């Protein structure tokens, strides 16, 4: 393979906050198809796959000529579903892109892929700076970083010392993760941790098992689609943001 990196987009319909959201349409294109087409614009990867068990998603993606990796129905999170799908491919590195990121910027994924190939760590998560209005939003996962390692994740802002050092800055996690293939499969063989279950944060399995989760800072996007109200934000961004509008024109006319 040219780059030895594939993007897997895990997807399901039963979202508790906004059911069936990945098939909701923005400018007549399903959200998951927005995400897939943007992933196709990334240069430093080999393949883009949708990992799912839902027949409606499978039909939708096949109608758009996309690649599917079928998985079992029950998974506790996207990382688990992507790990099962990973067994069907041979890429050395896997980038997991969440299916509710219709504003994801392909160039940032491209730079992330280059960073993975250069550093060759086992676990990565893209992070970004937190806006004031995001501090109390529990749909946004926050994290603390110490010596270039993500040491804790949470939904409410907390002040917690790590190795007797008080962290100065909190960051937010984006739905863009990277894994060395063997390390991803090793991770999923570990049982779900208490923190993972309690907080509903899949990254806690990495942290609780003392694996090093490396942060990668990106600008990120204005919103993922967690709630119905986020649809309007995404639509307005595509309409009014020059970068987003340019990307949309590419995926609408070229990446089908």
Image (tube, grey):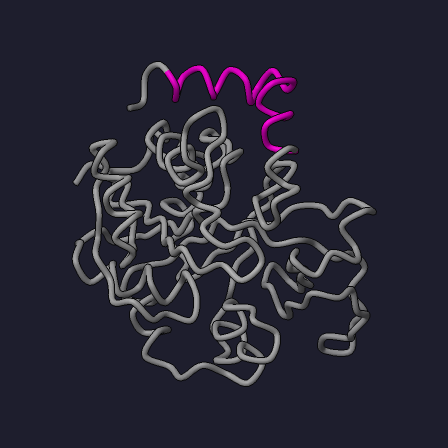
- Residue nearer the viewer, 148 or 155: 155
What residue span does the magenta drawing correspond to? 233-252
Q: Is residue 104 left or right of residue 134?
A: left
Query: Residue at coordinates 59% horizontally, 27% vertically from top-left?
Result: 235
Query: Residue at coordinates 64% horizontally, 25% vertically from top-left?
Result: 236
- Residue nearer the viewer, 28 or 42: 28
Q: Quadrant of residue 59?
A: top left
Q: What count of labels does the image hold?
A: 0
Instruction: Find residue 17 and report its horizontal and vertical position in percent.
Output: 58, 58
Instruction: Find residue 208 and report its horizontal and vertical position in percent.
Output: 53, 79
Instruction: Find residue 14 and report its horizontal and vertical position in percent.
Output: 44, 60
Query: Residue at coordinates 29% horizontally, 67% vertically from top-left?
Result: 73
Tell whether position 234 is magenta: yes
Above/below status of 50 relative to 253: below
Q: Quadrant of residue 196?
A: bottom right
Magenta span: chief secondary structure: helix
Above/below status of 7 relative to 104: below
């Amino acid at each position: 393979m040219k780059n030895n990196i594939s993007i897997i987009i895990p997807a399901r319909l039963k979202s508790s906050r906004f059911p069936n959201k990945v098939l909701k349409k923005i400018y007549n294109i399903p959200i998951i198809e927005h995400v897939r087409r943007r992933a196709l614009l990334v240069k430093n990867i080999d393949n883009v796959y949708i990992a799912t068990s839902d027949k409606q998603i499978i039909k939708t993606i096949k109608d758009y000529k996309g690649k599917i990796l079928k998985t079992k129905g029950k998974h506790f999170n996207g990382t688990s579903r992507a790990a099962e799908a990973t067994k069907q491919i041979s890429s050395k590195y896997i980038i997991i892109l969440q299916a509710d990121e219709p504003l994801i910027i392909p160039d940032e994924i491209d730079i992330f892929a280059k960073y993975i190939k250069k550093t060759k760590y086992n676990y990565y998560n893209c992070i970004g700076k937190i806006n004031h209005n995001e501090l109390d939003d529990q749909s946004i996962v926050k994290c603390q970083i110490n010596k270039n390692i993500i040491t804790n994740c949470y939904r409410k802002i907390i002040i917690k010392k790590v190795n007797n050092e008080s962290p100065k800055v909190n960051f937010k996690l984006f739905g863009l993760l990277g894994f060395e293939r063997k390390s991803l499969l090793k991770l999923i063989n570990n049982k779900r941790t208490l923190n993972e279950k309690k907080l509903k944060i899949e990254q806690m399995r990495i942290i609780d098992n003392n694996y090093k989760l490396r942060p990668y800072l990106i600008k990120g996007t204005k919103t993922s689609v967690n709630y119905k109200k986020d649809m309007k934000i995404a639509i307005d961004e595509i309409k009014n943001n020059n970068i987003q509008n340019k990307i949309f024109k590419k995926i609408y006319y070229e990446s089908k």
